[in-house]
Amino acid sequence: MDELLADLSKKIKDGTYPPGSQLPSGRKLADDYDVSQSTISRAVAKLRERGVLVGRPGRGVFVAESDRR
C-alpha cells in the first residue's frame, strides 16, 4: 500500500489530480493499480486523514483545496 500512497500523492502534487478535482472511482483505481477496492479504500482513508483528500457524501472523493498537501 505504500507504493499506492506514494503514487497517488505524486499525482496530486504534480497536478494529475489538481485541487478540487474528483478522484476516479474506487473500482477504476483498483483496476488501474491492480489491487482490491479495500486497498484503495484504506489508501484514500489515509490521505483523508492527512488532509490531502476530502469526501463529499453522495458525490465522491476530491483533492483538498488547501495547501496541506
Image (cartoon, rainbow, N blue to C red):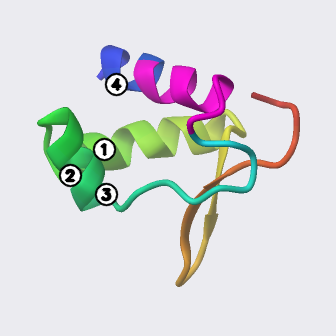
Label 3: which residue? 26
Q: Secondary structure at mark 2?
A: helix
Kindly indicate whether the residue at mark 3 contacts the one at mark 2 (C-beta within 8 angstroms): yes
Residue 57 colored in magenta in the image: no
| Alpha carbons under labels 3 and 4: distance apart | 13 Å
Label 1: which residue? 40
| Alpha carbons under labels 2 and 4: distance apart | 12 Å
- Magenta span main SS: helix
Residue 65 position, x and y percent, is 83, 48
Kindly indicate whether the residue at mark 3 contacts the one at mark 1 (C-beta within 8 angstroms): yes
Label 2: which residue? 37
Kindly indicate whether the residue at mark 2 contacts the one at mark 1 (C-beta within 8 angstroms): yes
Residue 26 position, x and y percent, is 31, 57
Label 4: which residue? 4
* Crowd around label 3: few <14 · some 14–19 · many ≥20 (10 Å): some
* Crowd around label 1: few <14 · some 14–19 · many ≥20 (10 Å): many
Q: Tell me the quarter of the picture where residue 42 sits.
A: top left
Please name the residue shown 14% across and 37% down the image.
Answer: 35
| Alpha carbons under labels 4 and 1: distance apart | 8 Å
Please name the residue shown 45% across and 17% down the image.
Answer: 6
Magenta residue span: 7-16
Taking depth in this image into account, of 13 and 49 the one nearest to the observer is 13
Q: Amino acid at mark 4?
A: Leu
Q: Amino acid at mark 3?
A: Gly
In the rendered view, does 39 fall on the left or right side of 60?
left
